[in-house]
Amino acid sequence: MTITSNRPAWLEALEHDGVAVVPAAIPPAEVAAFEADAYAWLGTFGYDPLDRTTWKRARLPPAWRTGMYSSAAHEAFVWRLRCVPGILAAFASAWDTSPETLVASFDSINITRPLGKFGRNSKATKPWPHLDQDPGRAGLELYQGIAVLSDSGPNDGGLCVLPGSHRLHSEYFKAFPPPPWKPNRIFRIPARGMAWYAARGVTKRKVEAKAGDLILWDSRVVHWNEDPIGERIRLAAYVCYCPRSLIAEDVLSKRVQLFYTRTWTNHKPFLAVAGKECVPRLAEPEETDTLVRLIGSSVEDST
Ligand SMILES: O=C(O)CCC(=O)C(=O)O
Ligand SMILES: [Fe+2]
C-alpha cells in the first residue's frame, strides 16, 4: 500500500535539510509591484536603476553589508509584501499553526547592485557564515525567511547555507562552547567551525530560486549570502514570523510602540530589539486587520 501525504515536499525539505524553497508563494503582480516600489524608494535618494550613471554609493541610503536596507522596514510596499497570504500560509505550516496567530519582524529589504563599472566597485564579498539564533539556545528558535523578488541563479545574489547544519547545532556548541550572547548580534562561524562541519559532510549550497518564491530556513542552519556577480540586481525582503504565543506580553506592547514610531527591528519577532526610526518616504502602511495582527496588537484591541 502506498501512503500518500498532503504534506508539501518543501516541509519535508525544511525538516531534513533545514532549508526549503516554497515555490510561487508570492503572486507575479506582487513581485512586479514590489520591484517598482523598491526602485521608486531608492529613487527618492537620487538613484535610478535604469540609469547606471546614478549607481553611486553616495546616492544610496545607509546599508548593512552591500545592500540590506533596514530603513525601508515600514514602507507601505514592504508591509504589503509582509501581508501576502502565500507567505503567511507557508510560515503557518512551518510552525504548525494558523496564519492568524502570526506576528512579524520589522525587517530589512535587500537591493544589491551587481559588480562592475557603474555597480558596486568593491570586490565580491567574502563568505560570512553565521547564525542569527542565540548560540546558547539548544532547540529551534525561529524559522527565517526570504521573499525572493528577483531570480536567484548561480551568478545572482542569494542565500548560501550549510544544509543539515541544524541537526548538528548542539554537537557544534559542545565542541565550541559559545560565549554569552547579545540578542541583536549574529554569531560568526570561524574557519575552524566550517572545517568541523565539512568533516561531517556538511558543505555549502547556494539556494537557487525564482522571483516569487519564498525561502525558509531553520535558524540553527549556518548561512550567509553572496552578492550578484552577473548583471542582475538582487531584490529580496527578509520576512520572519512566529506565533504570538511565543511572545511575552511586554514585548508585544513594545512591538506596537515600535510600529507606531516606525522603528525597525532585527529578524526576531519575539524580541523587539529596537533599531533606528525610519521615515517612510513613499507611503505610510495601510492598517489592515492583517497588519494590526502582525505587529502584535490584537484586532479587537485596536477597534
Ligand atoms: O541575504 C541573505 O540571503 C541572508 C541574509 C541573512 O543572513 C539573514 O537573513 O539572516
Ligand atoms: Fe542571517
Image: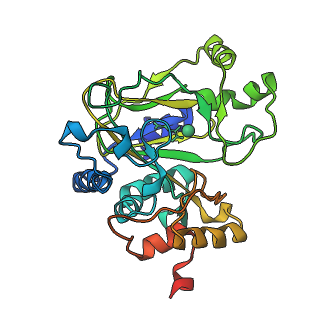
In the rendered image, which quarter is residue 242 located in?
bottom right
In the displayed structure image, the side of residue 64 where residue 286 appears, left or right: left
Instruction: Tell me: 7 left or right of 175.
Output: left
Asked where in the image residue 297 lies, by quadrant, the reply is bottom right
Q: Residue at x 46, y 47 (%)?
A: 62
Question: In what quadrant of the picture does the N terminus appear?
Answer: top left
| Colour scheme shown | rainbow
| Relative vertical location of residue 115 with respect to residue 73 in this rendering, above or below | above
Q: Is residue 224 visible?
A: yes
**Image coordinates for residue 46, horizontal then vertical, percent:** 28, 51
Q: Nearer the viewer, residue 116 or 272?
A: 116
- Residue at 29 percent across and 42 percent down: it is 211
Give the residue displayed 68% in from the left and 19% down from the top. 193
Above or below 286: residue 273: above
Point 58% across, 51% down: residue:
266
Front residue of this view, candidates 243 and 271: 271
Q: Is residue 23 left or right of residue 49?
A: right
When the figure is inspected, residue 85 is found, relative to residue 31, above or below; the finding is below
**Nearer to me, 199 or 98:** 199
Q: Position of residue 262 (x, y in %)?
A: 51, 67
Above or below 267: residue 79: below
